[in-house]
């Protein structure tokens, strides 16, 4: 009898255990099914939100493409498609209608956050720049409470397209060696990628094998031509031949693909129109603005077709004139006019210590300008500058400026050149410089033989040349927060190379110089000797100083989920 009782208890215990186990499995299955259902709903909601924002941006791009910034047309002239806008107030009127339509159509929220970026009501009357946040609320189906928000910042601007890219050229782009690029790349012609860094030492040319370049996950390589790569293979198959004092590509060793180290960009054609900058027209526009003449005004139209030399001489009485930098620094607050710096004694001006805050004024330098520091403290400059000569930057500088380097008025066929030599350029109050040079842009000996890769930018700004450019980051360590663009000139080639456009040579690893250069190669991205990270805040910070173009474009930031 006792054994039968034990058997019953054991049987009931086993049944209970299996029952509990079954309930547990059932509960887990139900939970997983519910979790999967919630996850599917979450993914679908996220996709719906992303799609709504993308469609909003796509239509916004199409609609603003019809806007045209232009002087007022006679009333009897019909303007097909385009909506003529000759002042920022006209733009706001058009945008109000557009935003209301988009919000209703796509269920998004579009908030004007322009004032949050320092563009107050007064500046808004002068600028065509607008900043919006496009967001979409994801709500719980039962409670209808928002539990997640997807948003994207967009910047509406009338600036040239080159500012949208980390590096680029309307001609060819050549990436030799282990650069690291966080941002988009634009090649209006072809793109070439190799794993060899070319360099010059004591006037002799050399090649050193290194890694291929690397980009961030979100980078895009826009190539309107073709793309090629070459594997140097320790010299067994070379990418370049050194002849006639040039690095000449051995085209037979290049294949029709693009190779990157660790992380590669997506590759596609640029579908959007590339809005170019007319350098001479832009300088004239800024010179007229500096003289107090508003763009598209009737007075503006009477001057804009004249040469820069004519404008400079005819408008001098609208400027305050100083003959030395020290006099300018001491008396900057004594005038509300923009300033001309010129001297009969010397065409070279040194701004190499202290601060110069131009506030809302422009500075026109009639001669060559040197920016540097002659004391153990950074020289600081805030304001927009036109250099009618050449520009040299060397030493520790803090800038909050847009600088145009045009060239001498008495030598109109010799474009102004810019040399950035042994320099560290920081932003004044976390701003930056946008530097545009009509002639050569040379960046040389930046933090030479520095092997402490701090990842701190040593050149903060956007650097542009109308000409071709070659950058060497083999002995140098160049870390740019901003961008680098060489428009390109087919009548010549990039210095030391057989192509027109932008050439970047970058070693990855440590470089020393006991006698001649000594290399310690690395595949570590953090040891790239050329680093560039694009900064979209340039469209907002630089305001009136940026090149003015007659087309509006939309700059789209990264998608954020909150």
Image (spheres, rainbow, N blue to C red):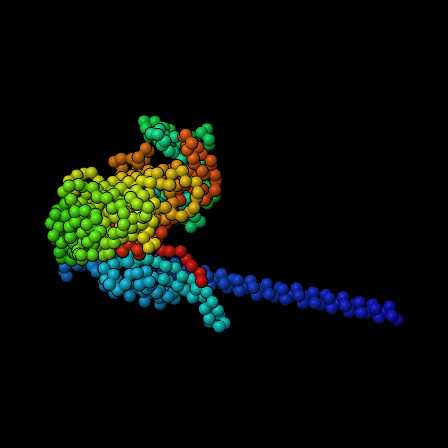
Q: Position of residue 7 (x, y in %)?
A: 83, 67
Residue occupying image coordinates x 29% and y 44%:
374
Where is residue 17? Give x, y as percent. Answer: 73, 66
Q: Is residue 433 visible?
A: no
**At 36% across and 37% down in the image, what residue appears?**
472
Horizontal arrangement in the rendering, residue 515 relative to residue 91 (left or right): right
Quarter of the view holding residue 260: top left
Rendered location of residue 387, percent (x, y): 21, 45
Residue ranking furthest to the bottom: 143
- Total of numbered circles in the picture? 0
**In this image, 348 relative to 40: left or right?**
left
User: Which residue is nearer to you in this view: 399 or 20?
Assistant: 399
User: Camera-side residue: 33 or 486?
Assistant: 486
Residue drawn at the location 22% of the way across and 40% of the way down: 415
Residue toward you, 214 or 135: 214
Q: Is residue 132 visible?
A: yes
Q: In the visual, does 99 lie left or right of 29?
A: left
User: Which quadrant does the C terminus fall into?
Assistant: bottom left
Say which of 450 and 561 sits in front. Answer: 450
Q: Residue furthest right?
A: 1
Query: Where is 527 relative to 199, above or below?
Result: below
Residue lying at 18% horizontally and 38% vertically, measured from the top left: 413
The image position of residue 66, as x and y in percent, is: 26, 57
Image quarter where the N terminus lies is bottom right
């Amino acid at each position: 009898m006792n054994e039968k009782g034990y058997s019953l208890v054991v049987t009931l215990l086993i049944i209970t255990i299996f029952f509990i186990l079954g309930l547990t499995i059932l509960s887990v299955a139900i939970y997983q099914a519910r979790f999967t259902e919630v996850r599917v709903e979450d993914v679908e909601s996220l996709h719906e939100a992303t799609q709504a924002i993308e469609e909003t941006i796509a239509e916004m791009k199409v609609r603003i493409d019809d806007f045209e910034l232009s002087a007022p047309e006679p009333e009897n002239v019909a303007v097909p498609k385009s909506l003529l806008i000759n002042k920022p107030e006209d733009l706001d009127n058009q945008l109000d209608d557009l935003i209301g339509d988009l919000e209703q159509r796509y269920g998004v929220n579009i908030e004007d956050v322009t004032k949050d970026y320092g563009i107050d009501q007064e500046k808004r009357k002068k600028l065509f720049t607008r900043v919006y946040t496009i967001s979409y609320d994801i709500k719980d189906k039962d409670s209808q409470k928002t539990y997640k928000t997807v948003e994207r910042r967009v910047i509406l601007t009338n600036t040239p397209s080159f500012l949208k890219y980390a590096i680029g050229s309307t001609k060819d782009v050549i990436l030799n060696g282990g650069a690291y690029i966080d941002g988009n790349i634009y090649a209006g012609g072809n793109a070439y990628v190799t794993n060899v860094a070319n360099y010059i030492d004591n006037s002799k040319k050399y090649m050193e094998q290194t890694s291929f370049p690397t980009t961030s996950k979100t980078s895009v390589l826009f190539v309107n031509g073709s793309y090629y790569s070459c594997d140097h293979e320790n010299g067994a198959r070379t990418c370049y031949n050194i002849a006639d004092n040039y690095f000449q590509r051995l085209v037979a060793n290049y294949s029709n693909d693009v190779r990157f180290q660790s992380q590669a960009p997506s590759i596609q054609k640029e579908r959007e129109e590339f809005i170019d900058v007319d350098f001479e027209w832009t300088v004239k526009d800024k010179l007229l603005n500096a003289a107090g003449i508003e763009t598209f005004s009737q007075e503006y139209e009477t001057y804009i077709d004249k040469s820069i030399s004519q404008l400079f001489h005819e408008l001098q009485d609208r400027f305050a004139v100083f003959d030395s930098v020290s006099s300018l620094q001491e008396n900057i607050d004594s005038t509300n006019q923009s300033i001309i710096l010129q001297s009969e004694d010397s065409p070279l001006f040194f701004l190499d210590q202290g601060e110069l805050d131009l506030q809302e004024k422009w500075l026109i330098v009639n001669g060559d300008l040197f920016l540097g520091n002659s004391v153990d403290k950074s020289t600081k400059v805030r304001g927009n500058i036109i250099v009618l000569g050449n520009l040299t930057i060397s030493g520790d500088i803090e800038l909050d400026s847009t600088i145009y380097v045009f060239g001498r008025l008495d030598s109109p066929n010799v474009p102004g050149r810019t040399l950035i030599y042994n320099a560290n350029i920081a932003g004044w109050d976390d701003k930056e410089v946008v530097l545009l040079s009509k002639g050569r842009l040379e960046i040389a000996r930046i933090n030479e033989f520095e092997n402490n890769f701090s990842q701190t930018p040593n050149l903060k700004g956007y650097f542009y040349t109308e000409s071709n450019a070659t950058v060497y980051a083999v002995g140098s360590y160049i870390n740019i927060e901003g961008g680098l663009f060489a428009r390109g000139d087919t009548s010549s080639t990039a210095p030391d190379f057989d192509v027109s456009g932008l050439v970047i040579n970058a070693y990855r690893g440590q470089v020393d110089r006991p006698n001649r250069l000594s290399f310690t190669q690395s595949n570590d991205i953090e040891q790239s000797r050329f680093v560039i990270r694009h900064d979209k805040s340039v469209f907002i910070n630089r305001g009136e100083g940026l090149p003015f173009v007659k087309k509006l474009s939309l700059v789209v930031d990264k998608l954020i989920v909150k």
